[in-house]
Image (spheres, helix red, strand yellow):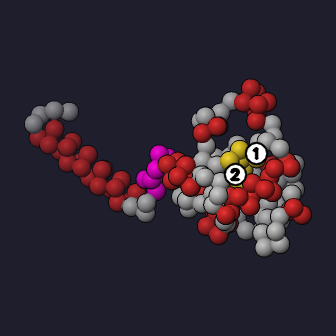
Amino acid sequence: MCEELPDDIFVIIKVHPLLTKKYPYDNSSLTTDELLPVTDLLITDYSSIIFEYSIYKKPMLFYAPDMVEYGVERGFYLDYNKLPGTIVTKKGQLAEEVVRALEGSDGQTAAVEAFYDTYMSGCDGTVTKRLADLMEAGGKRREAAYAKGRK
């Protein structure tokens, strides 16, 4: 696929940590946490990394040449056809879809936003404060219940 892409597109391969021995294709020593914020496009298959990546509200592609078999053998937590990105099932289409996604002409921007809003909007930098406030409020409710003779 790389030879089919324009020269200004650099592909970084990061294999799932549990699969690096079986598939030693990583071409970056950076961690996934370091790569996600600086990546312009995520290409994945069935990984949960889409949740973390949606925080950046950037385009995603789903390369799933074995989608039917995977669905039968393992199943999906979510409707795979409704994920926020184009599903590519043929290797020959991948380069074309990469270019489309990077240009923003894949029509998936709203889908990425909706996915973020549904699953990750709580990751807004204030979750610790909200949790502390909730715990404090819960403590006050328990104190009031004990004061009224309830346990």
- Find out whether the residues at labels 1 and 2 contact each other: C-beta distance under 8 Å: yes
| Element marked by disc 1 | strand
Q: CA distance from mark 1 to mark 2?
A: 7 Å
**Tag 2 or tag 1, which sits nearer the N-term?**
2
Q: Residue at x 68, y 30 (%)?
A: 75
Give, as a single range, the part of the protein colored magenta: 117-123
Q: Is residue 91 visible?
A: yes
Quarter holding the C terminus is top left
| Element marked by disc 2 | strand
Tag 2: amino acid: Leu
Q: Quadrant of residue 79?
A: top right
Q: Residue at x 79, y 60 (%)?
A: 13
Whether residue 38 is situated above or below residue 119 in the rendered picture: below
Most extreme residue toward the right is: 3
Nearest to the observer: residue 32 or residue 140? 32
Q: Quadrant of residue 64?
A: top right
Picture coordinates of residue 19, whole percent (x, y): 80, 49
Neighbourhood count class around disc 1 (C-alpha, 10 Å): few under 14, some 14–19, many 20 upward: many
| 121 magenta-colored | yes
**Residue labelled with disc 1:** 88
**Residue labelled with disc 2:** 61
Q: Is residue 17 visible?
A: no
